[in-house]
Amino acid sequence: MTGPPEPPAATLDWDAVLAWRPWLADAAAATAGEAGEAGGWHGGVPTSDGTVTMPHARLSDDAARFLRELYDEQVVAPFDWGVWLQERGRELLEDHHALETATLEECRMLLAAVARSDRFVDGAFLTALTDGTIARILGRIDEVVRRPSAR
């Protein structure tokens, strides 16, 4: 699917997703890589027999609930996020000024791309939680939803 996901972003229950903003502010304040409010990295340490366990990201219960909420509210829906993330999505993630002009649909696509990319890059979602990326995206969504003329 090359277009934006269905149903359209304007029809989603953004209040349910935006209700997570206070928690996300705390999660972004946690230090990435440590067991914090959003989760942390586990493994990568030698076992008693000398083998090393594979490091892996583990979301906290709250972070896992937030991720599930994105799916339940249909924020994460099928579209060609990998291709989109290579162009416009990357610009929005890397340039804070570009994110300030993002549409509601682009914000939704960013959240979906970050959630989906975690299946291919372990820890991508955890990193986006702890470095403030998701909090910034939700901040922009809040602006757009509260100011309909900004769409």
Image: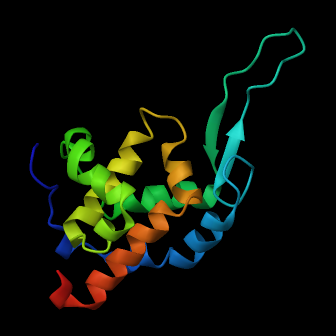
Image quarter hosting the N terminus: top left
Residue displayed at 54% across by 58% down: 129
Q: Quadrant of residue 111?
A: bottom left
Q: Is residue 96 left or right of residue 61?
A: left
Residue 59 location in percent, x, y?
A: 61, 49
- Asked whether the viewer can see residue 111, the reply is no
Residue displayed at 44% across by 70% down: 136
Q: Quadrant of residue 62?
A: bottom right
Residue 141 location in percent, x, y?
A: 33, 76
Residue displayed at 59% across by 58% down: 130
Q: How many marks?
A: 0
Residue 33 versus residue 148 in the image, above or below? above
How does the figure colour the protein chain or chains?
rainbow
Residue 43 versus residue 36 in the image, above or below? above
Q: In front here: 40 or 13?
A: 40
Image quarter hosting the C terminus: bottom left
- Asked whether the viewer can see residue 107, the reply is yes
Point out the residue furthest to the right here. 48
Residue 122 location in percent, x, y?
A: 52, 35
Q: In front here: 129 or 76?
A: 129
Q: Is residue 144 left or right of residue 16?
A: left
Residue 84 location in percent, x, y?
A: 20, 46
